[in-house]
Image (cartoon, rainbow, N blue to C red):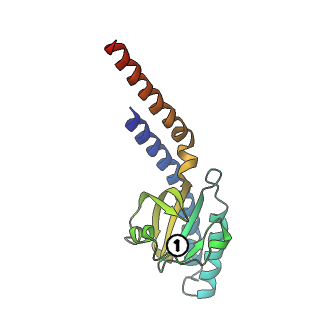
């Protein structure tokens, strides 16, 4: 039952994060389409302006209390994060970055700066961006993790009581 509950919670979290990821990718797609409409996709200054506009809009996407949209470029530098101090940070040597380099859409758990995150990701080819929707694992599983200890304690206590009843 616990495994089924955890799997259901994972699926629910993944769907929630996928809606946020889709929102972020649509923002980038709209900016690329705007560049194409006016034939500006070959002008670096215009592309940069469109990327900055997308970054600002993506940065405003709320994911729970502490989640965020994280965008990492192909070389491994963070270019969008809710934590402004992370922008420009090179994460190419992080174990989790090596697993997203395959440019596939997917989900995974990752640890960044000692914090566990649930993430879904998609590669945005026009700008070579890895777009991740991230939520702290504790925020998603907080109450479940809290209760898990009580459930195991109650199960252990029940086993001891049952053993004593059967012995005596």
Rendering coords of residue 40 (x, y %): 58, 83
Helix, strand or loop under label 1: strand
Depth order, front residue of 167/70 = 167
Name the outermost residue toward the top.
168
Identity of the residue drawn at 60% across and 56% down? 67
Q: The N terminus appears in which quarter of the rendering?
A: top left
Rendering coords of residue 145 (x, y %): 52, 41
Rendering coords of residue 134 (x, y %): 54, 58
Q: The C terminus appears in which quarter of the rendering?
A: top left
**In this figure, what is the number of numbered marks?**
1
Rendering coords of residue 129 (x, y %): 50, 73
The vertical placement of 71 against 138, above or below, is below
The vertical placement of 17 against 146, above or below, is below
The vertical placement of 12 against 154, above or below, is below
The vertical placement of 140 against 86, above or below, is above
Q: Quadrant of residue 54?
A: bottom right
Depth order, front residue of 129/2 = 2
Depth order, front residue of 163/59 = 163
- Neighbour tally class for label 1: few under 14, some 14-19, many 20 plus, Cα within 10 Å: many
Q: Quadrant of residue 162?
A: top left
- In the shown orientation, is residue 40 left or right of residue 6? right
Depth order, front residue of 124/115 = 115
Residue at which label 1 appears: 72
Identity of the residue drawn at 61% across and 76% down? 51
Identity of the residue drawn at 45% across and 45% down? 10
Name the outermost residue toward the left.
167
């Amino acid at each position: 039952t616990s495994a089924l509950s955890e799997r259901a919670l994972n699926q629910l979290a993944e769907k929630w994060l996928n809606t946020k990821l889709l929102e972020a990718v649509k923002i980038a797609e709209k900016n690329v389409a705007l560049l194409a409409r006016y034939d500006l996709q070959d002008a670096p200054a215009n592309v940069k302006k469109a990327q900055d506009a997308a970054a600002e809009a993506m940065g405003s996407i709320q994911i729970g209390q502490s989640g965020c949209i994280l965008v990492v470029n192909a070389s491994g530098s963070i270019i969008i994060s809710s934590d402004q101090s992370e922008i420009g940070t090179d994460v190419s040597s992080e174990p989790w970055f090596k697993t997203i380099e395959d440019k596939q859409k997917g989900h995974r758990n990752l640890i960044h700066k000692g914090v566990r995150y649930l993430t879904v990701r998609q590669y945005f080819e026009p700008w070579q961006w890895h777009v991740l929707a991230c939520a702290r694992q504790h925020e998603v599983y907080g109450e479940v993790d809290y209760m898990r200890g009580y459930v195991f304690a109650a199960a252990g206590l029940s086993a001891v009581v049952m053993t004593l009843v059967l012995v005596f």
